[in-house]
Image (cartoon, rainbow, N blue to C red):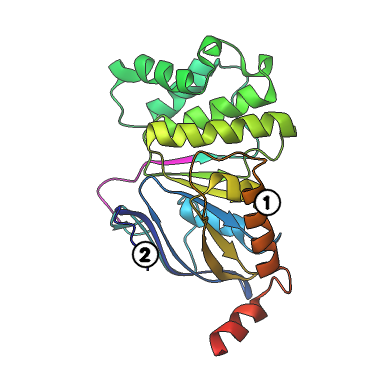
Amino acid sequence: MNTDTRETVLKVVDLGVSYGETPAIAQLDFEVKRGEFVAILGPSGCGKSSMLNVLSGLMAPTRGRVVVDGDELYLPRSKDPRLGYVFQAHRLLPWRTVRQNLEIVLGASDVPRDTWHARIDEILEILHIAEFKDAWPMRLSGGQRQRVSIARAILVDPSYILMDEPLSTLDEVTARSLRQELTGICQRTGATIVFVTHSIREAVYLADRIIILTRGPAQVFENYIVPLERPRDYDDARIAEVEADIVARVQAPWGLETVKERDVA
């Protein structure tokens, strides 16, 4: 029984996506609560990119609804929701400093201009890169650039932040450091995160809950509650045990037929 009393920020109802006659997403139904860290885990080609395009407001679904803070995303509304997005690549403009890159995001929002500098300084301090606010992006390391990308997503206090494998291009040492920092950032800011990953270990370490998708066209295979308290240690044997449990659940087979068989049973 779900005892989480937090308000629902994101609700996906009967979501389907097709490209012509080719289905990319069969059906997705799930919710994300305020302040929750939810990982999306699924095999390559299952429709995760299509799902992100829909959740970010870039592409209307073929079928179904996306509800953000009680309002439908693809219906006319008085005010568009604030959404953050962290990509695999940092996508910073190299001819603008870190501060100037962040000001672009603020300029497209309704955040009062007289609060910009204080807000930027606060977020960069949380991410341990305050000393680089006047640096050019290409003078930063890959990990530092991705920290700026995360700052850009958090800066406007979004309803939720979509993260598309944001650590996959980093070396493992840097990625581990950023995973640890992400948990602290969520606790300090109260951010709501939807985090797409191929790494089961990463999902177990970071997430409160893991939505496991089937092989494409995607359905929800399982809504998996991570049974570990915080803080977590990446090398904790319990994380390896949960990882092994998830692998055992999806390994044979990780596919649509498993959902059909389970539903019939």
**Amino acid type for the residue under numbered disc 2:** Asn
Indicate whether residue 193 is drawn in magenta: no
Predominant SS along the magenta part = loop
Q: Could you say where residue 265 lies in the image, as x and y percent from the top left?
A: 56, 89
Tag nearer the camera, 2 or 1: 1
Indicate whether residue 78 is drawn in magenta: yes
**Amino acid type for the residue under numbered disc 1:** Ala
Which residue is depicted at the point 64% across and 62% down? 246
Q: Nearer the viewer, residue 78 or 213?
A: 213
Q: Are marks 2 and 1 in contact (CB under 8 Å)?
A: no
Residue denoted by label 1: 240
Q: Could you say where residue 1 lies in the image, as x and y percent from the top left?
A: 37, 68
In the rendered view, would you say 207 is above or below 18?
above
On the rendered structure, is 61 left or right of 7?
right
Residue denoted by label 2: 2
Circle count: 2
Q: Which residues are magenta?
A: 76-84
Q: Could you say where residue 210 lies in the image, as x and y percent from the top left?
A: 54, 57
- Specify few, some or many for label 2: CA neighbours under 10 Å numbering under 14, 14-19, or 20 or more: few
Which residue is depicted at the point 45% across and 25% down? 104
- The answer to whether one can see residue 153 in this image is no
Q: Nearer the viewer, residue 75 or 246?
A: 246
On the rendered structure, is 110 left or right of 39?
left
Q: Could you say where residue 3 lies in the image, as x and y percent from the top left?
A: 33, 61
- Specify few, some or many for label 1: CA neighbours under 10 Å numbering under 14, 14-19, or 20 or more: some
On the rendered structure, is 11 left or right of 26?
left
On the rendered structure, is 258 left or right of 58?
right
In the rendered view, would you say 141 is above or below 82?
above
Which residue is depicted at the point 43% across and 23% down? 123
* Cα–Cα span, label 2 and label 1: 25 Å
